[in-house]
């Protein structure tokens, strides 16, 4: 497919689509972070979901700067040459931040899955393992992985000719920041380096095989446990109901994650194992993958509102305190401490 034929598809998916999804997604993720940070939502899974929300928001912003803004304004209206010159500086700086956020999004999703697996399969051990303090250590490890792997994967050995000494010196340089790569050509250099990294075994293992296999296996086990728990829901305690609710949210997040990254997996398999470069459809697949990844990073708020009863309750409370939404979301007189007082009196009278 020629660039002229590809340009309208890039404008619709990457330009208009990613821009709209970024605006809606950042608003939804901001509300999610506010609700998840509430004291009554404090738990290990909410801390991990907070980390996931932060990574998704950062990735959406960088994706809009690198792809959405380019396709919407520069490539279509101002021309590709001007876009390459202007985005040389942005690409060399935002690309590594985007890699940080994408890696963090992958591994925070996996950490949330492991947390819910322990909670539903070993509820007694989960009281000591799935705590806020322990979740902070898990989040720190995920952040460390998210920073370490992209940093080293974006370092390259380049040749530095020294004319005076008549020799060539090898320098370890960051992607797009070497003097051999002008700023107006940094985006081309990163596209070429990304394709080589995309086919490398470390990328396939760390960013695809290991996270995706872990998510499929453990979420399948969580789904089995949720099916068993639904048969005995009447005999479950409130804490068990909460754990099951978060487990369902985790499964839904994983299903969305796997669905939106299916294009990326397909492209990696075709390029690596079948030596298929598909140059004719490469640009279209990249636009589709960019659009789907942005949908994945912006849709968790919908899952929280749909599947999380406690999240909806806390969201209503948060919105009711804002004067703009106070009329739409009034505080019910029976919520809060009044409920606990009434239930306490009832239990005391029943015991007496």
Image (tube, rainbow, N blue to C red):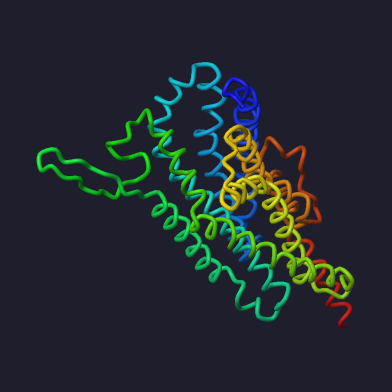
When asked about the image quadrant of residue 93, the answer is top left
Front-lying residue, 255 or 112: 255
Q: Percent x, y for residue 122? A: 70, 78
Q: Is residue 163 left or right of residue 259?
A: left
Tell me if residue 279 comes above or below residue 167 in the rendering. above
The number of callouts visible is 0
- Residue at point 42%, 52% (across, down): 153
Tell me if residue 187 comes above or below residue 239 in the rendering. above
- Residue at point 69%, 72% (across, down): 119
Q: Percent x, y for residue 184? A: 37, 28
Q: Percent x, y for residue 275? A: 57, 47
Q: Is residue 295 left or right of residue 196?
A: right
Q: Percent x, y for residue 269? A: 61, 51
Task: Classify the position of the C terminus by image quarter.
Answer: bottom right
Residue sticking out furthest to the bottom: 352
Tell me if residue 185 comes above or below residue 59 in the rendering. above
Q: Is residue 123 left or right of residue 137?
A: right
Task: Classify the position of the N terminus by image quarter.
Answer: top right
Front-lying residue, 54 or 169: 169
When asked about the image quadrant of residue 25, the answer is top right
Residue sticking out furthest to the left: 164
- Residue at point 56%, 44% (across, down): 57
Tell me if residue 161 comes above or below residue 136 in the rendering. above
Residue sticking out furthest to the front: 275
């Amino acid at each position: 497919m020629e660039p002229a034929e590809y340009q309208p598809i890039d404008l619709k998916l990457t330009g208009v689509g990613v821009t709209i999804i970024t605006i809606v997604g950042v608003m939804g993720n901001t509300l999610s972070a506010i609700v998840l940070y509430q004291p009554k939502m404090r738990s290990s899974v909410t801390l991990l979901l907070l980390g996931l929300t932060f990574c998704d928001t950062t990735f959406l912003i960088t994706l809009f700067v690198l792809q959405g803004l380019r396709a919407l304004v520069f490539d279509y209206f101002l021309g590709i040459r001007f876009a390459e010159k202007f985005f040389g500086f942005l690409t060399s700086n935002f690309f590594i931040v985007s890699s940080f956020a994408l890696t963090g999004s992958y591994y925070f999703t996996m950490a949330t899955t492991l947390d819910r697996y322990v909670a539903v399969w070993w509820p007694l051990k989960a009281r000591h393992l799935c705590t806020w303090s322990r979740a902070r250590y898990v989040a720190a490890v995920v952040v460390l992985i998210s920073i370490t792997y992209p940093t080293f994967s974006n370092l390259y050995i380049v040749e530095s000719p020294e004319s005076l000494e008549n020799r060539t010196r090898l320098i370890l340089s960051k992607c797009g920041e070497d003097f051999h790569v002008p700023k107006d050509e940094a985006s081309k250099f990163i596209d070429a380096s990304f394709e080589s990294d995309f086919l490398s075994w470390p990328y396939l293992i760390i960013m695809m095989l290991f996270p995706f296999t872990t998510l499929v296996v453990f979420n399948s086990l969580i789904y089995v446990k949720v099916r068993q728990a639904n048969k005995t829901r009447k005999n479950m305690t409130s804490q068990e109901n909460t754990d099951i609710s978060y487990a369902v949210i985790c499964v839904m997040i994983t299903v969305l994650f796997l669905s939106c990254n299916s294009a990326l997996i397909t492209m990696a398999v075709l390029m690596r194992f079948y030596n298929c470069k598909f140059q004719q459809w490469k640009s279209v697949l990249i636009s589709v993958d960019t659009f789907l990844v942005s949908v994945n990073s912006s849709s968790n708020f919908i899952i929280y509102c749909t599947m999380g009863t406690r999240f909806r309750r806390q969201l209503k409370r948060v919105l009711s305190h804002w004067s703009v939404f106070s009329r739409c979301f009034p505080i019910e007189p029976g919520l809060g401490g009044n409920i606990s007082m009434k239930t306490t009196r009832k239990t005391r009278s029943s015991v007496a």
